[in-house]
Amino acid sequence: MKVDEIMTKKLEILDADASIYDAIERMIDKRIRSLLVKPGDEKDVYGVITVRDIVYKVMAKNLDLNKTKVGEIVSKPLVCIDKGIDVEHAVNLMAKFNITRLFISQGKEILGIVSLLDVMSAELIKRAREGHSAK
C-alpha cells in the first residue's frame, strides 16, 4: 500500500504571523493535532506546529498566547516523502526520526499528511479486506 492511499488530503494551514491562540482555536475546532505553517517569504520553507509544541514551548513557559506567534515555535523543515512511497517505508522513517507524522509531497507541492493513526487505520482496513476475501 502506498502513502497516497492513506494520507489525509485536507490540510489546515496557518500563517507564521498568526498567534498561538489562533493555532489552538483552529486545532480545537478541527479536532486535529498539527497545523501546516506557510513560509514567511520566498526564501522560507513550510513548517509544522503541533499540540506538543504549543504545550511545551508556550504554555509550560507561561508565554502569552495572544502575543506569541506561530513562527516563533514552528518546526522546520518538514519531513516529506513522495506520494508513491510504501507505507512500510514511511513507518520506518517515522521510527528512525521519532516523529508521528510525515508530509506527502510531489515536487515542492505538499499533497497531504500521514500520521501514526492513519497507519493504524490502514492496517485495520487491510486486515478487514483480507478477512472478507478469505470467506
Image (spheres, helix red, strand yellow):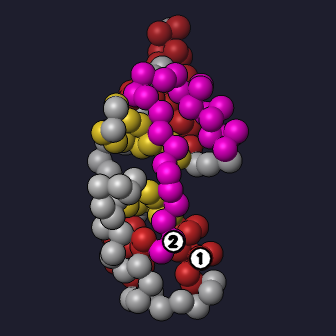
- Residue occupying the point 38% across, 57% down: 44
Above-or-below relation of 103 to 19: above
* Left or right, 16 with reference to 90: left
Asked if 64 appears above or below 15 in the picture, the reply is below
Q: Where is residue 74 drawn, in percent x and y?
A: 48, 65
> Magenta stretch?
72-97
Q: Is residue 108 left or right of residue 51?
A: left
In the image, residue 122 lies at what x, y percent? 49, 31
Where disc 1 sits, the SS reads helix
Using the numbered discs, state the Cα–Cα distance from disc 1 to disc 2 in whole angstroms: 7 Å
Disc 2 marks which amino acid? Ile
Instruction: Report the front residue among 79 and 23.
Output: 79
Task: Residue at 62% x, 35% y: name it.
Answer: 93
Q: On the image, numbered disc 1 is attached to which residue?
A: 57
Amino acid type at circle 1 is Lys
Res. 69 mark: none
In depth, the one of 34 and 43 nearer the eye is: 43
Q: Residue furthest top?
A: 134
Question: Counting residues from the N terminus, which is met first, the one under dot 1 or under dot 2?
Answer: 1
* Residue drawn where x is 36% and y is 69% of the image: 16
Image-quadrant location for residue 21: bottom left
Residue 36: where, in percent of width, then height? 38, 57
Residue 73's label in the rendered image is: 2
